[in-house]
Image (tube, rainbow, N blue to C red):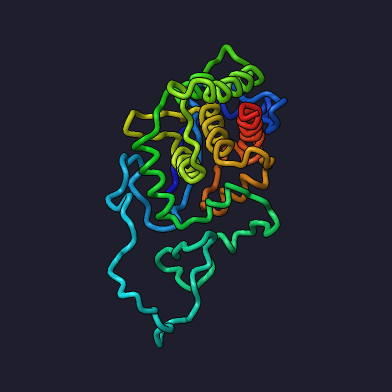
Amino acid sequence: MKTIKFKVRATAIAVAAALGIVAGISSTVPELSAGWSLVASAQAAEGGTAKGAGGPTGDHGKKGSASGSGQGQGGPSADSDAKGPKYGGGGSQPAPGTQGGAPVWAKEGVPSDLELGRLSVVRAPAQVLERQLAEALATMTLPFYNKVIEIANNAALDPAQKLEALKALVKESFVDGTTFVRVDSPLQNLALYKDVFVDGTITATAGTLTATSYNAALMMMAVFIGSASDKTLTITQATVDAINKIMLLTPAAGAPTAAEVSNWAEEVRKAIADAHG
């Protein structure tokens, strides 16, 4: 398990404890200085791509093998357990070491009746998300996300004002399709969510996004989850908990909680729905 830790000064912890940190949007989101950082740990499902590796992978865009002779594959071999892959999505293949068995997220307590909608693609094998991350890093433009971080780190704005500014920015991305461009693909947004979750940075071909302050990390996570979700499907704490469990991500003390991320992500989702009309 890869663990990324950021230093937190003891005096700042004491202040936060005295003031209290409340998850709801209507409450005060802590205004943290640049020295405060996201604290999180993450475990890759299967061998991961080096963080920040820009550009598509070598096999990006290739089609399946055309070497087949047109004959059937026949029955399972003598040493096969005769079980197919159990990952969600048609035609997906199991990650190395899991062939014929249930994926790791099946044992993590994700409610079977939880509706994830577009977010259900999070169940794709790790290598699929890695390819989508590489594509996102190679093609994404940064003005929209730099603006999100700017809003988050603006000490002159209170949490309610930051929320309104974020929602206005999301809606503006539908009006100005050349300057403020968001990633729309659910898979790419989820891959970027995992990338920023690990250490608060995203290293794209166009430049580096630094979301290591508490507020910036919270708002960037919310943007990625809100953008990946269905326009009409409410995002709840259970939604974010399920995503974290499936992706094997564990927020550590001091990091934005699933409740906080879901509250802000839901506002992003509603802004997107409003912009669609």
| Residue 90: percent from left, percent from top | 51, 61
Q: Residue furthest front?
A: 70
| Residue 175: percent from left, percent from top | 53, 21
Which residue is depicted at the point 61% across and 23% down? Answer: 167
Which residue is depicted at the point 46% across and 40% down? Answer: 192
Which residue is depicted at the point 36% across and 29% down? Answer: 208
Which residue is depicted at the point 54% across and 25% down? Answer: 174
**Residue 77 sits above or below residue 20 on the image:** below
153, 115: nearer the viewer: 115
Task: Tell me which corner region of the image, top left, top right, bottom left or bottom right, holds residue 255.
Answer: top right
Residue 4 appears left or right of 30: left
**Residue 143 sits above or below residue 78 on the image:** above
**Residue 82 sits above or below residue 7 on the image:** below
Task: Tell me which corner region of the image, top left, top right, bottom left or bottom right, holds residue 207.
Answer: top left
Q: In which quadrant will I find the C terminus?
A: top right
Residue 72 appears left or right of 269: left
Q: Residue furthest right?
A: 26
Number of labels in the image equals: 0
| Residue 15: percent from left, percent from top | 62, 24
17, 199: nearer the viewer: 199
Residue 222 appears left or right of 59: right
| Residue 60: percent from left, percent from top | 32, 50
Q: Residue furthest top?
A: 156
Residue 173 appears left or right of 139: right
